[in-house]
Image (tube, grey):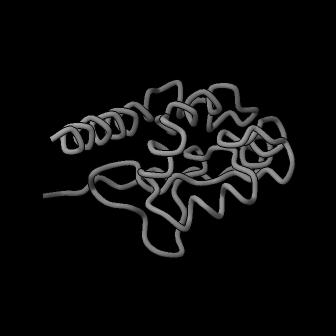
């Protein structure tokens, strides 16, 4: 099976914009915000240790919430603590981004598979917890 090559967009402009123009999606503070990368975006596997996904896949988290994200299972952090699909947040931010590459990536629907992946994960875990 051929694995498609990941499209990696690096954008310092987008990362800084997310950190400056948002609230933490967990605690709603505006202090100490960081652009937190979402590592789990498809069933093919995460990016490797020490590597980051494309800068399109970021959400605003304060320093403490970002540390919490890294100390636990990423899926549990977003669905258990926040009850959200973080990729939908990434999409909303990407569509408003001042970076043209990031905005174009979102407009072309390239985040749709990741959104579906997270929705499917949530559905599959809800079925196992109700049993």
The residue at 49%/64% (across/down) is: 72
Residue at left offset 63%, top offset 44%: 59
Q: Up-down: is 50 above or below 78? A: below
Q: Residue furthest front?
A: 131
**Quarter of the figure with residue 20:** top right
Instruction: Name the residue rendered at 77%, 37% in the picture.
Output: 23
Please determine whether, in this image, residue 70 is positioned above or below residue 43: below
Q: Quadrant of residue 73?
A: bottom left
Q: Would residue 40 appear left or right of 23 to someone viewing this image? A: left
Query: Where is residue 43 drawn, in percent x and y?
Result: 27, 51
- Report the side of 118 relative to 34 (left or right): left
Image quadrant where one finds the C terminus: top left
User: In the image, residue 76 lies at what x, y percent?
Assistant: 43, 51
Q: Is residue 53 left or right of residue 10?
A: left
Residue 73 in the image: above or below residue 57:
below
Q: Is residue 41 left or right of residue 9?
A: left
- Where residue 17 sits in the image (x, y, percent)? 79, 41
Nearer to us in this view, 57 or 84: 84
Q: How many marks?
A: 0
Question: What residue is rendered at 62% in x and 33% in y?
Answer: 94
On the rendered image, what quadrant is the N terminus found in?
bottom left
Residue 99 point in image, percent of width and height:
72, 37
């Amino acid at each position: 099976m051929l694995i498609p090559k990941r499209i990696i967009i690096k954008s310092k402009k987008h990362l800084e914009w997310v950190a400056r123009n948002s609230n933490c999606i967990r605690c709603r503070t505006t202090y100490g915000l960081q652009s937190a990368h979402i590592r789990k975006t498809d069933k093919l596997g995460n990016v490797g240790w020490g590597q980051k996904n494309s800068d399109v896949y970021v959400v605003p988290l304060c320093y403490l919430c970002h540390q919490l994200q890294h100390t636990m299972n990423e899926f549990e952090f977003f669905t258990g603590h926040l009850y959200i699909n973080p990729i939908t947040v990434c999409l909303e931010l990407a569509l408003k981004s001042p970076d043209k590459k990031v905005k174009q990536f979102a407009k072309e629907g390239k985040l749709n598979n990741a959104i579906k992946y997270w929705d499917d994960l949530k559905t599959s875990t809800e079925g196992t917890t109700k049993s």
